[in-house]
Amino acid sequence: MTQTKKMLLAAVSGLLLTGAFPKIGWDWLIWFALLPLLYALKDLPARSAFRMGFITGLIHFLSLLYWLVPVMRTYGYLPAYLSVTILFLFAAVLAVFTAAFSAGLAIFGRNSFRCLLIIPLLWVALEYVRSFIFSGFPWELLGYSQFNRLQLIQISDIFGVYGLSALIAFANATLFISLLYFIKRRWQDTPISNRLAVGSIIALIVAIVLTWSYGHWRLKTIDKRIATSPIARIAVVQGNIDQAIKWNPAFQIDTVQKYNRLSSSIIEQGPDLIVWPESATPFYFLYDIKPSELVLDGIQQTAKDYLIGSPSFVRKDEVVHYFNSAYLISPKTKTMGKYDKTHLVPFGEYVPLKKWLPFLGKIVAQVGDFKSGKKGNTLSWKNQRIGVQICYEIIFPGLSRAMVRNDASLLINITNDAWFGKTSGPYQHFSMTVFRAVENRRSLVRAANTGISGFIDPAGRVLASTALLKEAAVTQTVPLLKEKTVYTNIGDLFAQVCLAVVLLVTLLEIVRWGIKRKNG
């Protein structure tokens, strides 16, 4: 096969991967999306395999994260050429993970049996590394593509999203090995035996059946718990405030009046708590007197508890520290608690390495230099505790898990996805929230400025959701579960074991290479 054909196959894999995620959302593509790349790798050395994997990753992340360009152009005021350049650089960094997977497969998968085993192990290990290195960006891992497949995603309460990623990667590996067997091709000059081809297919069928069966059983047990659990009536208010005017002081009063009006419109539905999105008050709540009084007047009139997103600051030793916060407010006692965002957006809410790289600026002009809050902090509400996550904190499973371990019986995600406009960004963001509900068996409430707002039950069902770029106020009854799942207790142990195995294999490979070199 020519180099050009191999490159085309690698590019096809990148497009298939993207097609499995929202907005396209053809989730079935993910089960064979890696097949073209794997076929291109079948007789390549590590260096060439790295290049092929890089092509797949670059095409995938360029097409998946294209929405970064309009964000930077519209709100960062960057010219088109610079916005596209930054997207290419970011996609190139992420593509290194796919490239490392391909090179690792060429090195470690020297025979067909090892190839079959190393594909899911190596893929999951690299997904896990991507979740924390350079502050982490675990956006749309393989498993997230199946957020609508209720029976499949239930294993997340043991393995997290990585369990489903492993199953998908193993499915790709099995299809690849079986394909090579049926067309009489070799992997790295080793033939595919009938025993391996048939055995891998049987193993895949067993894995899928067990996953599906567990999901079917778990749905029944969770539904029984939901039926006898305490409930709460939660309302979300989606103001649909244009990001271009959101921070303009001239529109502060209009913004508050809109949120007050939408909140008043659902009082007859009897909500226990009304949730406004991230930075719903585009001013310093309780510090900027006039708009803050307008908010408090609205709360008094509705006589309901509120959770409101707002920037805040604390003065300490003549230094002002800014936070992206959420206030829990009662009409009787006013402020009942405040959560400060823990995981900040690099180059959006803070500039990494600013001390050493002062020339680096923020991509988005409207946001300031925020400080991080305390991880796992929950808010006391009635006889419950609430775990709040702001914006893309929800894509980091460890943050939700920390809150549930700190006795949160309800997870609330407030966000402002106005930056994304009508792109696939809001749909991708929303899809990942489903897994936080399943992993910890908690109801998850989401309030977004322009959408998508919604309610997800502990089984991962989307009970209700709003349209994008529309005003909305929706009330939903949600169950409040208290049990702690296996995942809540052990976290990403499965992914960590995969990483440990890969590191061990790497070490053994280095030792083997050293001995071989020493012996000439």
Image: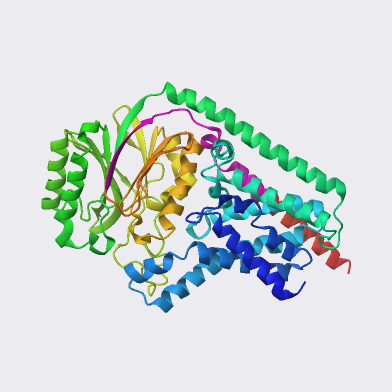
Q: Position of residue 497 (x, y in %)?
A: 65, 45
Which quarter shows the N terminus? bottom right
What residue span does the magenta drawing correspond to? Answer: 472-500
From the viewer's side, name the closer residue of 519 and 95.
95
Observer able to see residue 112: yes
Q: Does the magenta-highlighted stretch encompass residue 489?
A: yes
Which quarter shows the C terminus? bottom right
Residue under the image location 49 percent in, 54 percent down: 22
Above or below, 201 relative to 346: above
Q: Quadrant of residue 201?
A: top right
Residue under the image location 62 percent in, 35 percent down: 212
Left or right side of 65 for 179: right
Q: Does the magenta-highlighted stretch encompass residue 165?
A: no
Q: Position of residue 14 (x, y in %)?
A: 60, 63
Observer able to see residue 51: no
Q: Quadrant of residue 78?
A: bottom left
